[in-house]
Amino acid sequence: MSTFPAPVYAETVLSHNFRDAQRFFLEALLELHYAHTLMLTRQGIIPAESAKACLLALDALDRDDLRTAQYDGKFEDLFFYIESKLEALAGPDHAGRMHTARSRNDICIALYRMKARAEALEILKAVSALRQVLLKLAREHEHALMPAYTHTQPAQPTTLGHYLMAYAEAVGRDETRLQAAFATINRSPLGACAITTTAFPVDRDCIAELLGFEGLQLNSFGAIAATDYLTELAGAVATTMANLGKFTQDLLLWCNPTLGFLRLTDAWVQISSIMPQKRNPVPLEHTRILASRALAEAQGVFTCVHNTPFGDINDSEDDIQPIVFTMTANAQRALKLLAGVLSDCEFQTARMAEMAAADFLTVTELADTLVRKENLSFRDAHHLVSKAVKALGGKYSVASMAEATARLAPEALGRKLNLTHADLEAALDARNFVEIRTIPGGPGALQPVFNDTAKQEAQIEAWLNTKTTLLRNYRETLRKLSDLALKG
């Protein structure tokens, strides 16, 4: 006659889940035991004598033994393994009362949320640190000219500050998405029990507060069945990594000497084993693959929960958790690595400025100037400037472009231009191009944005401090209340 667990089941599933629980959820599970016991006795559901016996047993547990125990199949999972230890320490009657009005269903979801909220907070800290680096660099390079690219081709002059602020804004939106994910995660499912709550007079708000949750996942069915607390985090991470990957790809291109916009310091380059001249920007490649891994793992979270029943189902429980936490670990690595590289790199601003003033990049402003000063329609101005560009055959200079525009005006417009060559050359100046673009969002209007982002980052820092304090203080409160209960 066969007995549980079947060897292959133990080998392929239960032993893995046991180790994952030890790694990710042990401390949270013990905290949950303390909190549930305190709530039960406060509500008069179990006698104070049993509560004290359970709290003493929890204090007496050998944490090192729990962390290092090997799965042997005697108990289905870490929960039952710890329960056996508590029974040995407190006695079966007292320890057995601890499980009143709860299920492994709401216990496990609570543990997942407790770990996920901590991970979301750490990612947000890394995102905020990266944004601080970006903002510092943007302020330093507010006026540094560079070419903007569309369709991977040189398009118009802008500034490095303008470019960096574009990514900094995206990172700010990443912060907002992660804040929202944290708020969704940090709601307690405890009291839902198996899926329909309990007839015992439990205080769901009490145990939520004891464990640092900021409210309830109210509907008990949804508390067990819903997985959007996982997918919202995965979605926020995926978007963050997609943003990071696009930016990192640019940086890698900029490191190519052919472009020559970025030089990593010696601390960040790796050499070739055969080519003495190589300065390989390998950390940026590692940043890119770590971001890609985290993105793929985020997609894996969605794949695992997609088209599964809306209920208690293993697809969204033990086996998916390592994917979630590998995702968050790789995301943190990518973010920290990119922030480190950016904190110690050299933007080649002279080369950037040279490229910003080359290859016809300012001729949009020449057309705009013709509209303003010569009272032309934009289409007529565009047509004239286009003819001048073609006439130069790819050989650009400010002087030759001004000359060609003036020379072709009678044919294109039926009259000469009123603007002088000096006026036309001024319209083709890259610095002028940037400085007159002062409408909100333009490269000439960064100062108000710097002020706004400073306020935003102060708010983010305050939020992070509040949530970090919340997750630190509930443990201290839980310990104090347990000690008081033992003295009472």
Image (tube, rainbow, N blue to C red):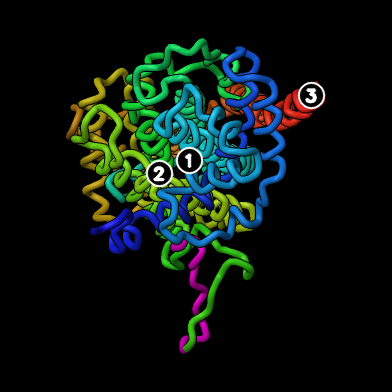
Q: Under tag 2, what secondary structure?
A: strand
Quadrant of the image occupied by residue 97: top right
Identified at 52% across, 39% down, the residue is: 115
The amino acid pointed to by label 3 is: Leu
Residue 157 on the magenta span: no
Label placed on residue 442: none
Q: Is residue 201 above or below residue 14?
A: above
Cβ–Cβ below 8 Å for labels 2 and 1? Answer: yes
Helix, strand or loop for the magenta stretch, by majority:
loop
Q: Quadrant of the N terminus?
A: bottom left
Label placed on residue 148: 2
Q: Which residues are magenta?
A: 274-286
Q: Quadrant of the C terminus?
A: top right
The amino acid pointed to by label 1 is: Tyr
Q: Is residue 482 left or right of residue 375?
A: right
Q: Which residue is mark 3?
A: 484
Mark 2 vs mark 1, CA separation in Å: 8 Å
Q: Earlier in the sequence, mark 2 or mark 1?
A: 2
Mark 1 vs mark 3, CA separation in Å: 57 Å
Visible in this render: residue 162? no
Q: Which residue is mark 1?
A: 163
Q: Nearer the viewer, residue 363 or 202?
A: 202
